[in-house]
Image (cartoon, rainbow, N blue to C red):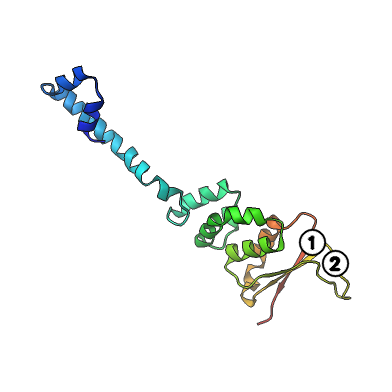
Amino acid sequence: MTANEIAHLLPWVYQRALRDDRLLAGLLDAIEALLDPAEQALVTFPERLDPRQTSDAFVAFLARFVDLDPALCASPDRLRDLVVQAAELHRLRGTRLGLERFLTLATGLTPIDVEADATDETGRSKTFLMRIHCPPGAAGMVPLLTRLIEREKPAHMEYEVVIKPA
């Protein structure tokens, strides 16, 4: 907002005094300078809220708003993807598809397949066991995968992480 725009908001007595009073004009210039940073922040506000455009630090802040832990991502870009997809992931939470998407977005590993009602060594179906099959490149990410699965799996399910051979 310029000093002229501010002057038009003043009562007519002040507007008339502006013609002769340099002190009042200087005060309006100071107000203009003080308002400028706030106006610039408001202009860029939509970009700051967009996880694809904002800074890494603010993406972590946004992640907490959608119930994501920034420490559980392989990279800041992965966290951006998770924040963008958060509504859909929350809708799918507790499902096989939701877990697959969450793990893929958080780690960048593809394909990740979740086998629900997996079988044990004897071939019997284990109703509350899911087996998570990960690509060969996931060997170094097992601790991260474990933390992610613990956070996202249904409470009644057990799981095994299986790394596919190369």
Secondary structure beneath disc 2?
A: loop
Asked which quadrant contains residue 105, the reply is bottom right
Which residue is situated farthest in the left direction here? 20
Residue at the image point whose x is 76% and y is 64% from the top = 159
For badge 2, the amino acid type reads: Lys
**Is 94 drawn above or below residue 166 in the view shown?**
above
Secondary structure beneath label 1: strand
Looking at this view, name the residue that lies furthest to the top: 13
Instruction: Give, as a three-letter code, the residue at label 1.
Output: Glu
**Quadrant of res 123:** bottom right
Q: Which residue is mark 2?
A: 126
Q: Residues within 10 Å of mark 1 (few under 14, many from 20)?
A: some
Instruction: Identify the residue under disc 1.
Output: 158
Q: Residue 101: image x %, image y %?
A: 63, 63
Q: Position of residue 164 (x, y in %)?
A: 69, 78
Looking at the rendering, in which quadrant would you find the C terminus?
A: bottom right
